[in-house]
Amino acid sequence: MRRTICFLAVCLLLCGRLAAQVTLEGSILDANNGDPLIGASVLVKNTTTGTVTDLDGNWELTVSGLPAILQFSYLGYAPTEVEVTDADQELTIRLGDDAVTTEVVEVRGRRISEKQQQAALTVETLDAIAIKETAAANFYDGLGSLKDVDLTAASLGFKIVNTRGFNSTNPVRSLQIIDGVDNQSPGLNFSLGNFLGASELDVNRVNLVVGASSAFYGPNAFNGVIAIETKDPFLQQGLSAQIKVAERNLIEGGVRWAQAINNEEGQPWFAYKLNLFGFRADDWVADNYDAVYDSPASADNPGGYDAVNVYGDEYASALDFQRSSIPGIGIVHRRGYKEIDLVDYDSENLKAGAAFHFRLNPRKTLESSELILASNYSTGTTVYQGDNRFSLRGIQFFQHRIELRNRDDFFIRAYVTHEDAGESYDPYFTALRLQNRAAPLEQWQSPYINYWQGSVQSRFTGRDDYPRSIDYIGDPDGLRSARNQFFSQEEIQQILVEGHDEAQAFANTGDPFFNTQDFYEPGSERFEQAFDDITGRLPTDGGTRFFDKSALYHAHGEKQWQSVLPESSQNELSLTVGANGRRYTPNSRGSILLDTMGRKITNWEVGAYGGGTFTLNSRYRLSASLRADKNENFDLLFSPAASAVYTPNERTTFRLSFSSAIRNPTLADQYLFYNVGRAILIGNLGGFNDLVTIESLREAINAQNLDLLERFDVAPIRPERVRTLETGVRTTLFEKLYVDATYYYSFYNDFIGFNLGADASFDPTTNLPSRIQAYRVSANATDQVTTQGFSIGSNLYFANYFVLNGNYSFNRLNTASDDPIIPAFNTPEHKYNIGVSGRNVPLKLGAAVEDFGFNVTYKWIDGFLFEGSPQFTGFIESYGMLDAQVNVEIKPIHTIIKIGASNLLDNRVFQVYGGPRIGRLAYISATYNWQKR
């Protein structure tokens, strides 16, 4: 009897479960054109139960019971959710830029996912539709229109993305990843923009996480993360091709092919994609010939001056004769070389990539574990600006990745990046080498002084109105004042200018008596031979070419638990844990780092992190995480983060967060050894003692008094840290206006910069130096710095086809510090973007062209002081730039024609001091896109 009861109970339970199962079916279409979306995802919320659409966009899914919430998504489209309460419910879902479903109508054009809406940090997104609509010349430049983003151009091929201050042409405080892979240069330790990046045809979305983000992204996610996501060959198949021509003889082209292959059961099990991209253009020319900021000699100095983009004409104390007995000579600047004479402005970039995806359990489609093998190659020529301007010529990158993953479950990823600097060289140092080859400074100044004393000074000392010493006996101040007034006369100034020109020409003419050679004149065969010889040698062999065959090895694993609590719970708890390790193997042969005389340098770092998110009643989301990082040369450091998000309704979110980040010193901060002639730039792992300040050294030499020397020590370099408090709100008003506002306050400690000092020995008899070696030593700041900022962005959707968008950002450095190590803020206090765009606007030019799109964006940047190296420090004037584009789609040939221009009004402006003036770049492009069904 007992067995019978148990059997009946089991039968009733099974019948109940079977009776509760419901099979749902429907289709997913493109909201704009009604085309079926192949491979779109259908998922039961908070479960792993799901499916994908077939070749006709249809789907079928069995659920355990009703009601059920289904999530519909497709790469490049807005995701949406539908609550299903009836098995016969109509489930034709339309996704796209409209984000329209049969149940919900959201703001037209809004492509903000629920995850992004409820993100604790500020996340800006450039998705596939925004890439198509951007008025900028390419998707990477289009990032500059996002809220909180500073995008500057050091050259046509090298763009820098930065957020929240402390901008630099060495973007070491931001992290750029592509499909989770850090695409930094292993030797430089930062990304070269999109030089080693993704082809525009393969970019699905760019997420820019603003602010400190080390908790999950690791060291160097200091001021933000640029996360580029490429297209999945399983979901986005077919052939894409693009050709673009523009001003500055720009020609750009790309092609992408992706295909999935089915097994015997008709299920996709293998997919691959191939990408090829090429670009060439005449780069912008850096031709700023203003006097260097705060230089001792102004541009009207008769003896010359130090111009920004002229190298070799820098101030030298040996040529400062203001206190000498030689009348009228003043400060002399040696003739230098313009950057245009030293730099290869033929900008080129070639990128190739291949990726192979294997589904290990094809029946599960998107829920299947996936094995990925990918390789990318990039090469080209561009100009990079750091402490100097560098000509990267023929530089190459090789990147290989293997990854095992299951979406929203786990991944194990390993990759390696190799680089080869090719024929890259330092133009500034090249100018010094050319000068020294003609005549070292000590030998060059002798004929200059001799000519001045023998042929020039008599032109004014013989005049009756020349103030003579005999007339001012006992009154040296009076004599000095009289002579200053005399030399300020326009007629005398002309004599001085002519005299300096003649003396310069005389000193630049070779003379066997002084053991000097002629100046190497740009454009001459003699110049070209010397230039090729210098740039073809390493610094250790008297040249300026730098050797770099460094590599980076990285492994990373992560596990997620999307729903830890029972399904019956109204609350949710998700957990994430992960760990990574990295190893650098720099190889510069002593041209940049301390890897000389067979010494090999390696550096490793490891990290682990964990965190969770608790969602209460679908309204409150509390998150916390902690990351620990250990570098081989530095102590274990922790990066905590916590946030609270309140969502009172589906359209509004309030957030409050605390985040932190660390930045490990770069390889250069640790191991640099670069002799630039007048100083040695040096890393600092062990610290330095008894260096002499440059200012006190000059005073002691002039006074021949060693008591004036000021000595200091430099502690070993250590990581820098930031902590940030942030609050914000995102909401949709009146069904048409989306608003996102943020305020932050940050605390920075141990900023990494450098100290200037000298190691000097002195003759005890004369108190004159017998040996001086100047150093620029990597070091940490001692002062804490705070910054704050506010930003707001909004989109107003109107008249079915149009969007008015705008954003404003305010950033301020609160702490005024005299600490010379603290890096410059280099950020405009105010900036804004405002634009209007239209999408699918009816045109009615026949069946081939039914509609068109356009975008007009105006950007305004407040003026600010840009502080780079002493050579590249100056004020960036306020400027505005107008970008515009119009596009039409010719549907019968699957082609989009786009005509536009960045900086349409050709307002030539400096975006970074020392860089070129950026002008208009008008372009026309044709993009072919055939989706394989």
Image (cartoon, rainbow, N blue to C red):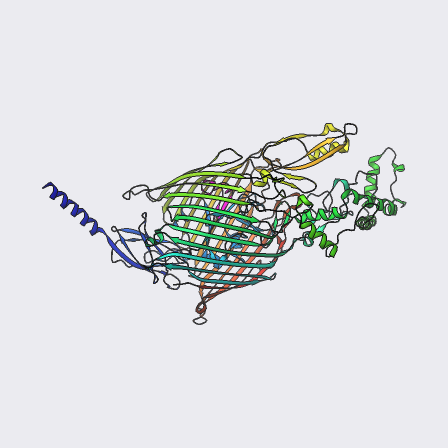
Q: Is residue 904 left or right of residue 555?
A: right
* Residue 598 belongs to magenta span: no
Q: Is residue 633 among the parts visible in the rendering?
A: yes
Q: Residue at x 25, y 50 (%)?
A: 64
Residue in the foreground of this view, choosing between 30 and 558: 558
- Count of numbered badges drawn on the protein: 0
Q: Residue at x 40, y 48 (%)?
A: 404
* Residue 217 belongs to magenta span: yes
Quadrant of the snapshot with the C terminus: bottom left
Query: Is residue 359 shown above or below 712?
Result: below
Q: Is residue 581 left or right of residue 454?
A: left
Give x and y (percent) for residue 688.
63, 32
Q: Is residue 663 among the parts visible in the rendering?
A: no
Give x and y (percent) for residue 20.
22, 51
Residue segment shown in magenta: 206-227
Give x and y (percent) for residue 123.
46, 47
Q: As drawn, which residue projects farthest toward the front?
A: 598
Q: As drawn, which residue projects farthest toward the left?
A: 1
Residue in the foreground of this view, choosing between 878 and 505: 505
Give x and y (percent) for residue 588.
60, 44
Quadrant of the snapshot with the N terminus: top left
Q: As drawn, which residue projects farthest toward the bottom?
A: 846
Q: Is residue 171 left or right of residue 675?
A: left
Quarter of the rendering containing residue 521 = bottom right
